[in-house]
Image (cartoon, rainbow, N blue to C red):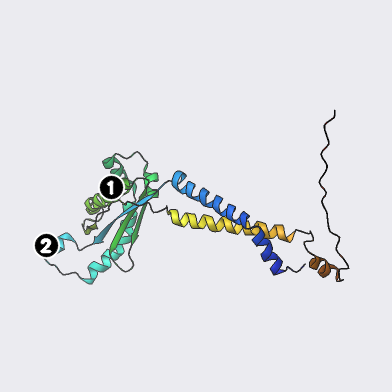
Amino acid sequence: MEEINLKELFDYFVSKWFIIAIAGLVFVVAGASYTVFLKTPMYNSYTTMVLTTNNEKSNTSQSITQNDITLNKNLISNYRVIMKSHSILNQVINNLNLNTSVEQLKKKVNVTTEDDTEIIRISVNSENAENARDVANEIARVFSNDVARYYSIKNVAIVDYAEASSNPYNISLLKTTVLALLVGVVLACAAIFIMFYFDTTIKSVEEIETKIGLPTLGVVPIKYVPKEKKGRRK
């Protein structure tokens, strides 16, 4: 493999700077245009709930026992599944008059728990910020009303209601622009390197001497003689 002269490579890159500039500009414009005009903004809202003690027990005693904590932790996994069940989501769709199916709505809902806590977070993604807020709050409301139907206890309470987000979570013009610029510059540099690597033309006297290992005896200048214009025929 032929060794690459780093100075020649650098000089070659400098001579092709306009290619890098144009590529970077094109990718920046393309990335920004896609983000602003084509990419669908998505919004996220979430409601948090906490598992409490059984209501019947709390009427006689305010203390929370270890059994209560253990019971709640065992129930959390079941509650997460129930919150995304057809029974709950069907009620949400009907209550909010949503034009969607249960399966479509289920894909937009994510139920998680905070580590080593009894906190449940109901997170909803939607193309509409108000819709994401309403669905998250309605799931929490419907579940808190129906939980006694499943376990004969009512041990959940809403901590924070969801609020409509003003900024989409999947769109960042600055991030997209910087990423597009980097991609454009990298691709342009790769193309220039390939052009340099496969360029076999001799560009200097020194390069000839290096390749053949002999000194140059002389240089024949190239003289360009402009062609004479033909006169008009009389």
Element at label 2: loop
Element at label 1: helix
Q: CA distance from mark 2 to mark 1?
A: 32 Å
Does residue 14 appear to the left or right of 138 in the view shown?
right
Does residue 194 appear to the left or right of 47 in the view shown?
right
- Nearest the camera: 129 or 47? 129
Q: Residues within 10 Å of mark 2 (few under 14, many from 20)?
A: few
Q: Residue furthest top?
A: 234
Number of numbered discs present?
A: 2
Give the residue type at disc 2.
Answer: Asn
Give the residue type at disc 1.
Answer: Asp
Q: Find residue 204 and report its image quarter.
A: bottom right
Q: Nearer the viewer, mark 2 or mark 1?
A: 1
The answer to whether the residues at label 2 and label 1 have Cβ atoms under 8 Å apart is no
Q: Earlier in the sequence, mark 2 or mark 1?
A: 2
Q: Find residue 115 and report its image quarter.
A: bottom left
Tag shown at residue 59: 2
In this view of the protein, can residue 210 be seen by the observer?
Answer: yes
- Give percent across and percent down for residue 90: 31, 43
- Give percent across and percent down for residue 230: 83, 36
Q: Residue furthest right?
A: 217
- Quadrant (top left/top right/bottom left/bottom right) for the C terminus: top right
**Disc 1 marks which residue?**
134
- Quadrant (top left/top right/bottom left/bottom right) for the N terminus: bottom right
- Nearest the camera: 63 or 130? 130
- Nearest the camera: 140 or 17? 17
- Nearest the camera: 67 or 156? 156
Residue under the image location 28 percent in, 64 percent down: 118
Q: Residues within 10 Å of mark 1 (few under 14, many from 20)?
A: many
In this view of the protein, can residue 75 be seen by the observer?
Answer: no
